[in-house]
Amino acid sequence: MSTRSPSTARPCVEIEQLRKLYHLGGEVVAALDGLDLTIAYGEHVAVVGSSGSGKSTLLQILGCLDSPTSGTYRLDGQAVGQLSESSLAEVRNRRIGFVFQGFHLLPRATARRNVELPLVYGGESAAVRRERASAALEQVGLGDRMNHRPDQLSGGQRQRVAIARALVTEPAILLADEPTGNLDSRTGAEILDLFDELAGPDRALIMVTHDPALARRAQRLVALSDGRLAFDGPPSEHVAEVLHS
């Protein structure tokens, strides 16, 4: 399959010859095997692949939750592998937003309190936390649900809270792992509409998915197979082919 030419826009993510090896029993398994990938600011990318293709490992490394065995990863020009643990923690908190399939909200906290959490870890004052969390919830259409707990919200509303929490630090990269996996089709479509609105020139949006509808909504499709790049290009004509290859 053909691959996409590197973007001429300002790079957000730059990966060169990335390898991640796991030792399983007496075997060495390459979850990522010499991966090269550049994602620019403003891009909306869907990452697909079968189980064991390396997409979850890639997401973990992009989110600075795991480190590669070899190769380089630069986020906004900064070599992540050269950062101290404290600097990595700051990058995770301020430069990366995470949206998970399971929401991961504190059940007894209000929507606003859940959204404030990254700012608490970042040392922001109570007034700043409240203002920015309220603005993020307004951005995702939950201005009238700020004081509701997760059990008082629908699944789609809980995912909107999770998205607001990911956005509240104004991250450079937004990582989403099957963000509509726990939602019905109508609510999932609403969340996808929201992601379309959130894509902009100051953020890269990267989603891992096995859902063809989600993949088609992206601007760019990246498919992995056995830890290598199998396809990189526009999704419209190739989603079915890539997902079933």
Image (tube, grey):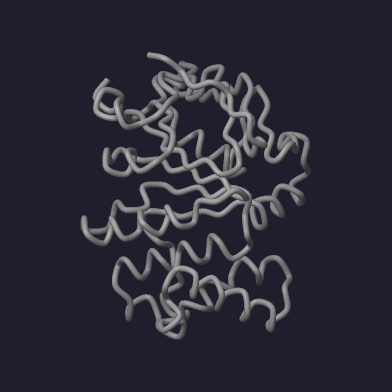
User: Which quadrant is the N terminus positioned in?
Assistant: top left
Q: Is residue 156 left or right of residue 14?
A: left
At 49% from the left edge and 34% from the top edge, which residue is drawn? 57
Question: In front here: 8 or 79?
Answer: 8
Say if 66 sits above or below 226 in the image.
below
Say if 109 sits above or below 65 in the image.
below
At 71% from the left edge and 47% from the top edge, which residue is drawn? 88
Q: Residue furthest top?
A: 1
Q: Toward which corner of the image does residue 167 lie, by quadrant?
A: bottom right
Question: In front here: 45 or 157?
Answer: 45
**In x, y percent, where is residue 100?**
42, 54
Say if 68 sits above or below 182 in the image.
above
User: Which quadrant is the C terminus positioned in?
Assistant: top left
**In x, y percent, where is residue 121?**
67, 67
Q: Is residue 102 left or right of residue 134?
A: left
Q: Is residue 116 left or right of residue 142?
A: right
**In x, y percent, where is residue 237?**
29, 27
Q: What count of labels does the image hold? A: 0
At 29% from the left edge and 51% from the top edge, which residue is drawn? 181
Question: In front here: 137 or 80?
Answer: 137
Question: In front here: 203 or 82?
Answer: 203
Say if 131 sits above or below 212 in the image.
below
At 37% from the left edge and 52% from the top edge, which residue is drawn? 179
Q: Toward which corner of the image does residue 120 lie, by quadrant?
A: bottom right
